[in-house]
Amino acid sequence: MNNENQLIEYCKDVLHYAVFNKDEQSNEYDIEVSDHGLVLKPIFPITYQITEKLYNDIYETLNLALTPELTLIRPLSMQIVTFDEADRNVARGIWFPWRVGKAKRLTMDFATLYKRYEESGRIPIMDIIDWDYRKSPHLIVTGVSGSGKSFFLSYLLKMCSRVGDVLVIDPKSSDLARWARHQPDVDTVLPAFVDGSKIGNQQGIGTSYLQAVNKRLKDVEILMYRRQSLLYQKSEKVSTDYSELGLKPYFIIADELAALMTGAPKSLKDEFQSTLTRIVVLGRESGVYLVMAMQSARAEYIPTIVRDSISVRLQLGRINSENTKFLFPELKEMPMIPLGGKGTGIISIAGDDRYAGIEPVATPTIKE
Ligand SMILES: Nc1ncnc2c1ncn2[C@@H]1O[C@H](COP(=O)(O)OP(=O)(O)OP(=O)(O)O)[C@@H](O)[C@H]1O
């Protein structure tokens, strides 16, 4: 028996006990495998019902039974494939994408990571996962304190500031702000308390800082409209983007957005959220991208429309249904098998055919 047949037999055995536990059901489906995933083909008539629950049960069973040889990817919804030439009773199947082996963490110096970017035009995340910001605009990372958000955001800041122009919003004035201080080309909006003179200012970061941030975001919005107008005037293509004009991407990198809004008056919060929404919804063609980190993607901190327009989502730290429900509402009670260690969690990249759903991630470790 070759490896492929052995794998199919193994999957059938595993599913026989856990999912298709009536004897006759073993003859009611077939399995095909490839390097990219598994198709389970029901042979109608069948005595089981094909529901989201069945899909999840099969996913869950295979996920554990196949790791680490294969890493199952959790699709955002049930995936059906069709076989147009096949007999009517076997002309469709349900699809479970996977990767052979495990994606590996990148542990190297920044120069080597940047070289990878130069070779591919995409920002490296793991050995076989990278971010093509033109196809998948905007990125959000969530996770509890100490899960590795700032570490990853600092890496992205270093990368983005080499790739394009950057505006840093750092209400905590920590990792991002400290790094940006020595970079004359990086634009930064920091709270007034940072220079020491305004400590004790009753307005705090809630009001004056949010005012300053709103003002800068408005400037970015104007830049975005200017780029769109140029594209309209200069491009003959129906589908195009800023790169046709020879422009660089513009990244807004924001840490702990929720802290920005605490204690601020409603009018300022509304203004902030609506500018952010326009940038995120319209930024793709003009090359204006939002990269942000926050503890939780709760709707009171980030408008749902902003969250839903962000293509790349990462959640770091402990993953459970309680904390994934904001950023990954489609995950429900689905368990993921984490890679473990600092800066690990789950990732989903929409808009890029190379990624089929939610999978484990470990962010790069940058060696000095
Ligand atoms: N990919 C990684 N490789 C190596 N170390 C990492 C990685 N990611 C995070 N760490 C380490 O984990 C620790 C916590 O990370 P970090 O400060 O980024 O967490 P955080 O989620 O931003 O927490 P907070 O919200 O409290 O700032 C740091 O000491 C950091 O150096």
Image (cartoon, grey):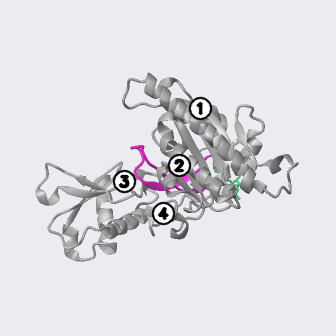
Specify which label sits upstream in the sequence, 4 or 1.
1
Specify which label sits upstream in the sequence, 1 or 2.
1
Mark 3 residue element: strand
Q: Is residue 357 magenta?
A: yes
- Mark 3 vs 2: CB contact within 8 A: no
- Mark 3 vs 4: CB contact within 8 A: no
Asked if one can make out residue 16 in the rendered structure from this viewpoint, the answer is: yes
Q: Which label belongs to residue 115? A: 1
Q: Which residue is mark 2?
A: 277
| Left or right of 340, for residue 170 | right
Specify which label sits upstream in the sequence, 3 or 4.
3
Report, in whole angstroms, how far the alpha carbon at label 2 lies from the one at label 4.
30 Å
Q: Which label belongs to residue 336? A: 4
Specify which label sits upstream in the sequence, 3 or 2.
3
**Residue range corresponding to the magenta coloring:** 343-364
Question: Dividing the image into 4 quarters, which one contains the C terminus?
Answer: top right
Q: In which quadrant of the rendered view does residue 95 lie? A: bottom left
